[in-house]
């Protein structure tokens, strides 16, 4: 029969595994739906992956996670100073300079909505300022065509 210490560690490990599984599978910003049509399910899974990649790009200060979803034109509204439609190259430069200046502390999505050919998320970009932190509101919208989701707009204010 195992000792009390062994039982404690087994119990502790089970709690940790259960907790970490639920943390990964439950993303409050994305409401899961059951789709009977597998093509529709795949379409919205791709949408979620696109948003995740973009979020990882901001979290890790890596434009390569974001720019892969740029189309020929991207609308940016970055702190109301860079506002308009930009080519992918221009958008990369603007977002890279933004992330260099506003050093990320945390990036998270709060809510999302999706439609047939359009989806968006609202979130927070938390950055360091001196010894403190400040938040910026983020809205990212995607458009769907040719079986892919593309960045339509990125608003950070």
Image (tube, helix red, strand yellow):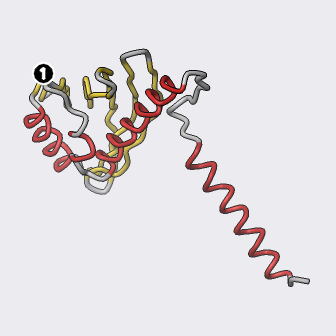
Residue 69 is situated, as x and y percent measured from the top left of the image, at: 25, 34
- Numbered circles on residues, count: 1
Quarter assignment of residue 94: top left
Classify residue 74 as left or right of residue 129.
Answer: left
- Residue farthest along the right direction in this orientation: 1
Residue 103 is situated, as x and y percent measured from the top left of the image, at: 24, 51
State the residue in front, 130 or 68: 68
Q: Residue at x 61, y 26 (%)?
A: 34
- Residue farthest along the front direction in this orientation: 38
Quarter of the image with the N terminus is bottom right
Quarter assignment of residue 134: top left
Q: Which residue is mark 1?
A: 84
Q: Residue at x 55, y 29 (%)?
A: 31
Classify residue 1 as left or right of residue 42.
Answer: right
Q: Residue at x 58, y 23 (%)?
A: 35
Mark 1 surroundings within 10 Å by alpha-carbon count, few (fewer than 14), some (14 through 19), many (20 or more): some
Quarter assignment of residue 140: top left
State the residue in front, 61 or 100: 61
Quarter of the image with the C terminus is top left
Q: Is residue 101 above or below residue 30?
A: below
Residue 12 is situated, as x and y percent measured from the top left of the image, at: 73, 68
State the residue in front, 41 or 19: 41
Classify residue 123 as left or right of residue 69.
Answer: right
Q: Residue at x 34, y 44 (%)?
A: 126
SS at circle 1 = strand
Residue 32 is situated, as x and y percent measured from the top left of the image, at: 57, 30
């Amino acid at each position: 029969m195992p000792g009390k210490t062994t039982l404690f560690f087994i119990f502790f490990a089970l709690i940790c595994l259960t907790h970490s599984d639920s943390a990964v599978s439950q993303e409050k910003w994305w409401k899961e739906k059951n789709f009977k049509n597998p093509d529709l399910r795949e379409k919205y899974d791709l949408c979620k992956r696109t948003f995740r990649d973009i979020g990882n790009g901001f979290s890790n200060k890596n434009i390569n996670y974001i720019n892969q979803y740029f189309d020929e034109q991207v609308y940016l509204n970055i702190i109301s100073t860079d506002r308009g439609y930009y080519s992918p190259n221009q958008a990369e430069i603007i977002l890279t300079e933004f992330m260099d200046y506003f050093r990320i502390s945390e990036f998270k999505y709060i809510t999302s909505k999706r439609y047939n050919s359009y989806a968006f998320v609202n979130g927070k970009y938390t950055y360091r300022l001196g010894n403190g932190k400040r938040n910026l509101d983020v809205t990212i919208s995607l458009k769907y065509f040719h079986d892919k989701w593309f960045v339509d707009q990125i608003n950070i204010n």
